[in-house]
Image (tube, grey):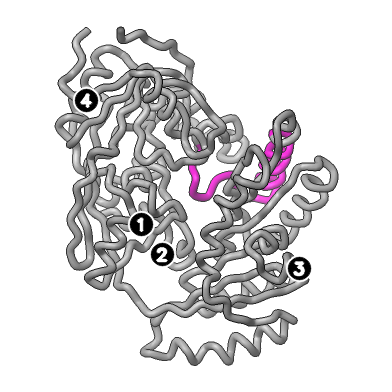
Amino acid sequence: MRLPKVEFKKTQDVLEVYSEDASRWYKVKPLGVFFPKNTEEAQKCVEFCYKEGIPITPRGGGSGLTGGAVPENGGIIVSTEKMKNFIVEEGFFISEAGAISGEIERKANKIGYTLPAQPSSLNFSTIGGNIATDAAGLRSVKYGSARDYIIELEVILPNGEIKTFGPQEAQIFAGSEGTLGLIAKVKMQLVKLKKRKTFVFLSEELTQSIKFSCELLKFLPSALEFVDKNGGKIIDVENGQAYIIIAEFEEDFDGKIDLIQDELAKIASEFGVKITEIKDIWERRKKLGPALSKIRQFKINEDIVLPISKISDFVEFARKKIVEEEKVNCVIFGHIGVGILHTNLLFGGGEEKDAQKAKKEIFEFVISQGGAITGEHGTGVSKKDFIQSELGEQTLNFMIYMKNKIDPKNIFNPTKLPLPKRGCIDIG
């Protein structure tokens, strides 16, 4: 078979790099990697794979944490990393899928705008990958997720057809994790950059800190974060003796952002919560995830979602069941304003079985409480076996119906949904 005239590599060093994502937990070598430089070249890659029946795994920055960009079933990776041109205008930007989100953000900042949905991986995730996982982030409590800001989405469908979708039609591809086609280009909204003020609240009592967080929501924060005591110790706040709530507010009230401080202090006092300011708190918070990778040999980072009223129960469950009974280190932090908690299991060699058991118990608890097993990371490989328990048979069947309708040959990320397995093809 003749390969399209697109950069293609299959040396062992390249295959090794593209065999895993940022989780470093799921690893399968692709048969090779295409590096298209624009939509037309990417289309040739898709047409080739469609004709030959070769599975495709789209890949952006490889910053995912669930194995979504890992070619679990073999096949070819189509990397968008060289499709990185973008332009920024007042109120929107147009970008190829491989542009780094942080680069778009910095250019937008220069003209007084910002990306509303910013994942923590902003500086190394791609804009196409953000849409494919429907990424959210620190300011999701106010701004939602990537899908909310799509104006147009250019997608290469499995048969090679290029189609442009409006904001409503594009929703089917937001969060589809590369199972329905290859996102090639996007047009998305930007929002005005505003003055921000951050407060840090500390409490020794878990229940009080969660109840206080609910009160803070009445003030419409732009960010509302939670860090447990284990996380607090790692980022050197109160020597890990307090639960941490970080609240950010934007200038939405005619220059009165400073006036809410007295009101916040009053409410904090009623809940027995200490209010303080830590100038570099956001830098510390953003470094927490990477810091965990250095504590033990392995880390599983799950992003469960719960109603805020259930978060105290979950943190207590994790402490008693996971840490004390299962003897697995656990650090919890996340976007409490929308109920997303990054639940990090830290373990060493030979302890994988215990960690996987702990993960299963966490998912079962979350589902039993009416929560979701993923809030922003996606399903990928790590959560595929739990999809039906969470979504139910009817919803899952609809997802499979759409997959079969759009990708009848099942060549896009073929094993990320519970469909029949397929074999690998040697491309020579």
Q: Quadrant for the C terminus, please.
A: top left
Pointer 4: residues within 10 angstroms few (<14), some, or many (20+)?
A: few
Q: How many marks?
A: 4
Question: Where on the picture, by quarter, is residue 389?
Answer: top right
Q: Please tell me whether residue 411 is drawn above or below residue 311 in the rendered image.
A: above
Pointer 1: residues within 10 angstroms few (<14), some, or many (20+)?
A: some
Residue interval drawn in magenta: 356-379
Q: Amino acid at mark 4?
A: Glu
Whole-number angstrom distance, CA of label 3 to CA of label 2: 31 Å
Tell whether label 2 touches label 1 (CB within 8 Å). yes
Q: Amino acid at mark 3?
A: Gln
Asked whether 180 or 19 is in front, the reply is: 19
Which residue does the numbered mark 2 point to in the structure image? 143
Tell whether label 2 touches label 3 (CB within 8 Å). no
Pointer 3: residues within 10 angstroms few (<14), some, or many (20+)?
A: some
Q: Furthest residue to the right? A: 325
Left or right: 238 as drawn, with respect to 388: right
Whole-number angstrom distance, CA of label 2 to CA of label 4: 38 Å
Pointer 2: residues within 10 angstroms few (<14), some, or many (20+)?
A: some
Residue 7, disc: 4
Whole-number angstrom distance, CA of label 4 to CA of label 1: 34 Å
Which residue does the numbered mark 1 point to in the structure image? 148
Q: Amino acid at mark 2?
A: Tyr
Which residue does the numbered mark 3 point to in the structure image? 241
Tell whether label 4 touches label 2 (CB within 8 Å). no
Q: Please tell me whether residue 320 is drawn above or below residue 411 in the rendered image.
A: below
